[in-house]
Image (cartoon, grey):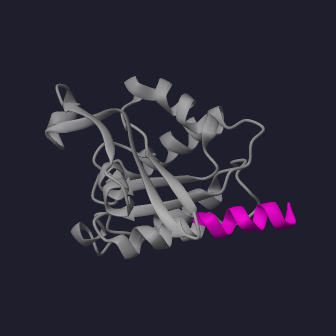
């Protein structure tokens, strides 16, 4: 999940070991200022882990007008990765917005959550600590641990694998220790 232009589609494409199913359409609203096409339903791929294990990768649309898809996609989710664009002026508002939307939709469910910060190279002087502080200030119902905040380049497989492995480890800990 995350706002338009945060790198969700690219992350799925980078990680997927199969051809990605995308539902991109030409952007016709304010999204056109960020990119030509936008996801209207989802991006779907698969990350093969070996021994028959795999992770289904689903990228949700970033626009609120497609938020009905968030409900559908979160029903099957086992973990959530929130991608945020560090170069956006509204970066903290984006964090609050998506955390609020997740909180509304995940009532009674505890899912591991990690936050990936993209486009860090465009504003390297601004510390990622702003996201960590904001998350500590919030009283969200995510598992009783610090939400990991990692700088990532959605085009770099190693960065995205680290983010996926982070939520996978959190999921394992939740299942093992409640």
Q: Which residue sits at x=22%, y=67%?
A: 122
**Can residue 35 be seen at all in this image of the molecule?**
yes
In this rendering, the count of numbered labels is 0
- Residue 83 is situated, as x and y percent measured from the top left of the image, at 42, 55
Question: Which range of residues does the magenta coloring cover?
Answer: 167-178
Asked where in the image residue 31 lies, by quadrant, the reply is: top left
Q: Name the side, left or right, on which 30 lies relative to 172.
A: left
Q: Which residue sits at x=64%, y=33%?
A: 104
Determine if the magenta segment contains residue 177. Answer: yes
State the predominant SS element of the stretch in magenta: helix
Q: Nearer the viewer, residue 84 or 93?
A: 84
- Residue 84 is situated, as x and y percent measured from the top left of the image, at 39, 54
Q: Nearer the viewer, residue 7 or 86?
A: 7
For the C terminus, the quadrant is bottom right
**From what the image shows, is residue 100 above or below residue 126?**
above
Asked where in the image residue 61 lies, by quadrant, the reply is: top left
Asked where in the image residue 4 lies, by quadrant, the reply is: top left
Q: Which residue sits at x=38%, y=62%?
A: 15
- Residue 150 is situated, as x and y percent measured from the top left of the image, at 47, 70
Determine if the magenta segment contains residue 10. Answer: no
Q: Name the side, left or right, on which 6 lies relative to 49.
A: left
Q: Which residue sits at x=31%, y=56%?
A: 13
- Residue 57 is situated, as x and y percent measured from the top left of the image, at 47, 51
Q: Name the side, left or right, on which 170 lies relative to 3.
A: right
């Amino acid at each position: 999940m995350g706002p338009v232009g945060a790198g969700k589609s690219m992350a799925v494409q980078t990680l997927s070991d199969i051809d990605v199913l995308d539902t991109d359409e030409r952007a016709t609203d304010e999204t056109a200022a960020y990119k030509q096409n936008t996801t209207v339903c989802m991006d779907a791929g698969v990350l093969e882990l070996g021994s028959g294990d795999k992770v289904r990768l689903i990228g949700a649309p970033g626009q609120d007008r497609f938020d009905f898809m968030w409900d559908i996609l979160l029903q099957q989710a086992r973990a959530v990765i929130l991608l945020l664009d560090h170069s956006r002026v509204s970066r903290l508002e984006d964090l609050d917005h998506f955390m609020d939307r997740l909180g509304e939709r995940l009532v009674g469910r505890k899912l591991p959550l990690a936050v990936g910060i993209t486009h860090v190279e465009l504003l390297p002087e601004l510390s990622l600590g702003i996201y960590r502080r904001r998350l500590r200030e919030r009283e969200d119902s995510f598992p009783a641990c610090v939400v990991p905040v990692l700088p990532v380049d959605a085009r770099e497989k190693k960065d995205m694998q680290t983010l996926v492995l982070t939520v996978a480890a959190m999921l394992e800990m939740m299942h093992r220790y409640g």
